[in-house]
Image: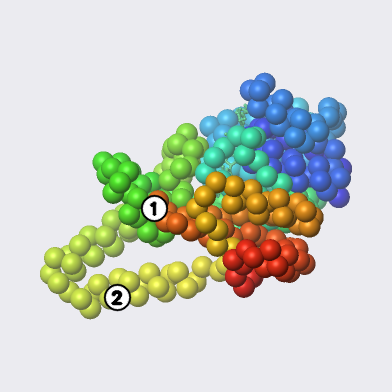
Amino acid sequence: MIKKVRIVGAGLIGTSVGLRLKAAGSSVEIIDINSNAMKLAADLVKSEVIAEPDLIIIAVPISANTQTVVEQLSNNSKSIVCDLASVKSDLLLKVKELSANSDNFISLHPMAGRETNGAQNARADLFEGRAWIGVSDSFSHAKNKEIAQNLVEICGGTLYWLNSKEHDDLVAKISHIPQILSSVIAGSLSSLSRENLNLAGQGLRDLTRLASADATLWSQILTENHAAIATQLDLIIDDLNHLKQSITSNNSAAMVDFFNKGNNGKSKIPGKHGAKNRDYSYLPIVIDDKPGELARIFNECAKVSVNIEDLNIEHSPGQETGLITLALSNSDCMKLSNHLENLGFKVHPAKNR
Ligand SMILES: NC(=O)C1=CN([C@@H]2O[C@H](COP(=O)(O)OP(=O)(O)OC[C@H]3O[C@@H](n4cnc5c(N)ncnc54)[C@H](O)[C@@H]3O)[C@@H](O)[C@H]2O)C=CC1
Ligand SMILES: O=C(O)C(=O)Cc1ccc(O)cc1
């Protein structure tokens, strides 16, 4: 149990962790240099002033991370200080160099986020079922490791340990390059008209989801992890040049190899992290494209006390019907499915993912 926590940085990540810790029974203080962000987050997490926190979590932009870690370490010699930044090698070197209390430091990285930053986008379940990377060369006491494990468990994630170099090399491949490629594809569409883009399939939406990401955060990540990213970019550019060569020389065997390599990489990406996953049933309902249809469904949910955990709407311009999929607990799903069917709604068999 982590009893008293201070969170520095009331943005997306800090407030999300704060919401989760508060729900788990911790006392939480959340602070920020921006008074509006701080007020919103403080209301959300019911912030209170804490004199001697067990744990101080730093969730500020990368550009302010090292300095904030060092300040908190020197002002709070009895607290463990933990940062959540996306890049680590330089941070560890500097903390060891600049802080006499670096033994109290532990560095973690939640591999989860959203395309939109700020406390207004925070969610208590942001880290549910997600991987966290613990930086193994950032602690020297078992207590730090224990508190990190505890924090990740409270957030519903699973903790894996890597050293800082392994961390930065790996995240260049599994997080930074995907972000760059998503942005480059979305950027290449900017000269197209809305009419043209209306014709796009789901694949383009899937590939460009990350392109809405916060530009300041990502420019800082690229700066901080420039060496590992440059190495990976060279490999990707080589692969693309090789593919271009295969296309211009009409080498179909090489093109098949290219896609087979992609199939192979994709098949290795696990869906889950062995942690608790959102265990929902997904109920598809076909609705007519007319005003009030969604409201009718929501009203029926309220009437039978069914809680909608999440929802997805598939609909494209000119289509007379839409598909709404509700994420529900298993019992709510059965109850709602029967109820809506009796009322004549077009309910389809529920799925588990
Ligand atoms: N956004 C994401 O998807 C993920 C972000 N991270 C890491 O989490 C950290 C925070 O990112 P977000 O929450 O997305 O950013 P954010 O922009 O939502 O929030 C950052 C907050 O820190 C505040 N701040 C800036 N300097 C400060 C200082 N010196 N003292 C106190 N508060 C300060 C800002 O006013 C802002 O409210 C970054 O280090 C990032 O690398 C890690 C995993 C995912
Ligand atoms: O949205 C996603 O899929 C992400 O991968 C978000 C993300 C952004 C930055 C990180 O350092 C870690 C995770």
Confirm if mark 2 falls within 8 A of ligand 2: no
Q: Quadrant of residue 346?
A: bottom right
Residue annotated with mark 1: 318
Q: Nearer the viewer, residue 196 or 166?
A: 196
Q: Is disc 1's CB within 8 Å of ligand 2?
A: no
- In the figure, is residue 160 to the left or right of 30? left
Q: Earlier in the sequence, mark 1 or mark 2?
A: 2
- Residue 33 visible in image: no
**Quadrant of the rendered image containing residue 324:** bottom right
Q: Which residue is disc 2 drawn over?
A: 257
**Residue 115 in the image: above or below residue 312:** above
Q: Residues within 10 Å of mark 1 (few under 14, many from 20)?
A: few
| Amino acid type indicated by mark 1 | Gly
Q: Secondary structure at mark 2?
A: helix
Q: Which mark is residue 327?
A: none
- Residue depicted at 81% across the width and 42% down the height: 22
Is 259 rendered above or below residue 127?
below
Q: Amino acid at mark 2?
A: Asp
Quadrant for ligand 1? top right
